[in-house]
Image: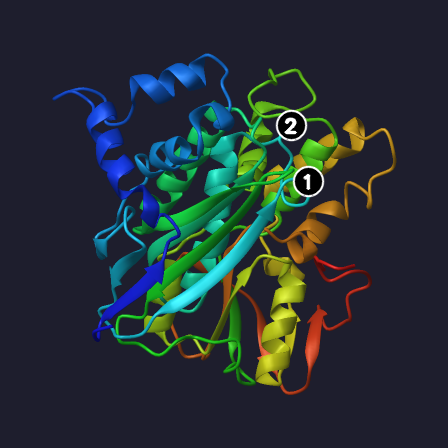
């Protein structure tokens, strides 16, 4: 491997001949649609499954929808992909999405799951101060999974990868009883050192780029029976809450905020995936500091209050908290917004997308308004 290039195994090597034939078969006519083939469209629109497409058919259909990315020298179609690494260092992160654990087919479209799967891994790259460059996607699914769902999944992955400036360079497929996605993201530091969890110092300010509690509110609305795109103004899930549903189904991390924080001199950074308190707890432990959150600075806003009221009225069982307490609970412990939380020296002038929510001090642990938080700090996978 030469300096400045990373070679990654994709698991799609044996399809080279098939791939060439499939490309000729499905290529859109000059001036026609960007994507689409009569074969895959016919199968999808007739209600066919991924088994009807076949292994190589689904691989080729998915690959045809994926952007290669500007740093990809060799993409899908060989035993491994070749991705340029201008700085000479590779930042890598992997994440899993399991049906029934991270999403429900009754809530989420294939497109939703594609966006979420990409965002989860890409946000980890941004949290290191790096620029996302590429994704590797492995999909396991039942043979009965509708082909339309799988193609929508590819579109969601492609959209979010493109929004981050990354390509999709390879992956694998397999049969399984439930849908399982494994997404590996790669990134480049552009010559900068990584921003790690260890590095926060007493006196640093704690700031966040992105929303807090919106995904948790969206999840609570879905669990209470609300569904996107089905409510009118007088229904229990008003249109005003659509953004919260979208925040859970299709998170939109501010990827540019990661490299921006690195250039500003961030001392520590993390992706808020398991809950603000839980994730800042990792920073506090790694940096050997005490982090105190000022709840008055969390900018809870009217949508969270409206969601709390809606959840309270929709729920047949008592919600885990009153409408008055739920917004703060969601913001502190909800997770899955994939916003970035970072610490900065107090002298740094932060741009508008970063809002200060607390401070690092001598000591250990995380508190809210100077007091320990009563209850779970966030998501724990094996709890």
What residue is drawn where x is 25% and y is 39%? Answer: 17
What residue is drawn where x is 61% and y is 18%? Answer: 231
Specify whether 220 is left or right of 190. right
Query: Crowdedness of circle 1 by 10 Å Cα count: few (<14), some, many (20+)?
Result: few
Residue located beneath label 2 in the image: 106
Image spot of residue 74 (x, y percent): 22, 54
Image spot of residue 207 (x, y percent): 51, 66
Across the whole image, how many numbered discs are drawn on residues?
Answer: 2
- Given residues 157 and 239, the one toward you in this image is 157
Image spot of residue 75 (x, y percent): 26, 50
Residue 259 in view, yes or no: yes
- Given residues 53 and 88, the one toward you in this image is 53
Residue 196 disc label: none
Residue 294 in view, yes or no: no
| Image quadrant containing the C terminus | bottom right
Kind of element beneath mark 1: loop
Query: Crowdedness of circle 2 by 10 Å Cα count: few (<14), some, many (20+)?
Result: few
Image spot of residue 38 (x, y percent): 30, 17
- Given residues 25 and 182, the one toward you in this image is 25
Q: Residue furthest top?
A: 46
The image shows residue 74, relative to residue 19, as above or below, that is: below
| Image quadrant containing the N terminus | bottom left
Specify whether 174 is left or right of 18. right
What residue is drawn where x is 39% and y is 34%? Answer: 155
Q: Residue furthest right?
A: 317
Kind of element beneath mark 2: loop
Residue located beneath label 1 in the image: 100
- Given residues 103 and 272, the one toward you in this image is 103
């Amino acid at each position: 491997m030469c300096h400045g290039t990373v070679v990654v195994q994709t698991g799609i090597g044996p399809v080279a001949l098939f791939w060439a034939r499939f490309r000729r078969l499905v290529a859109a006519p000059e001036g026609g649609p960007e994507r689409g083939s009569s074969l895959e469209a016919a199968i999808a629109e007739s209600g066919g499954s991924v088994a009807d497409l076949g292994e190589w058919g689904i691989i080729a259909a998915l690959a045809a929808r994926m952007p290669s990315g500007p740093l990809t020298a060799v993409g899908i179609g060989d035993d491994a992909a070749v991705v340029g690494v201008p700085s000479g260092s590779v930042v890598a992160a992997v994440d899993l999405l399991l049906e029934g654990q991270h999403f429900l087919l009754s809530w989420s479209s294939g497109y939703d799951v594609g966006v979420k799967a990409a965002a989860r891994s890409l946000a980890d790259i941004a949290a290191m101060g790096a620029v996302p460059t590429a994704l590797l996607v492995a999909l396991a699914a039942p043979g009965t999974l509708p082909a339309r769902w799988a193609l929508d999944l590819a579109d969601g992955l492609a959209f979010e990868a493109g929004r981050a400036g990354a390509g999709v360079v390879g992956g694998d497929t397999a049969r399984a009883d439930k849908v399982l996605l494994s997404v590996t993201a790669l990134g480049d530091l552009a010559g900068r050192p990584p921003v790690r969890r260890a590095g926060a110092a007493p006196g640093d300010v704690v700031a966040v780029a992105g929303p807090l509690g919106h995904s948790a509110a969206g999840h609570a609305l879905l669990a209470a029976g609300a569904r996107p795109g089905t409510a009118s103004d007088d229904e229990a899930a008003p249109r005003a809450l659509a953004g919260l549903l979208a925040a859970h189904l299709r998170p939109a991390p501010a990827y540019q905020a990661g490299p921006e924080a690195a250039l500003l001199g961030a001392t520590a950074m993390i992706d808020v995936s398991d809950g603000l308190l839980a994730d800042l707890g990792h920073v506090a432990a790694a940096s050997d500091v005490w982090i105190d959150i000022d709840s008055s600075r969390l900018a809870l806003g009217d949508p969270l209050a409206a969601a709390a009221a809606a959840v309270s009225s929709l729920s047949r069982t008592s919600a885990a908290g009153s409408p008055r307490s739920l917004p703060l609970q969601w913001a502190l412990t909800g997770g899955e917004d994939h916003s970035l939380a970072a610490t900065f020296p107090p002298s740094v002038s932060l741009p508008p997308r970063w809002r200060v929510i607390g401070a690092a001090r001598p000591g250990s642990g995380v508190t809210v308004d100077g007091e320990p938080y009563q209850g779970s700090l966030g998501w724990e996978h094996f709890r």
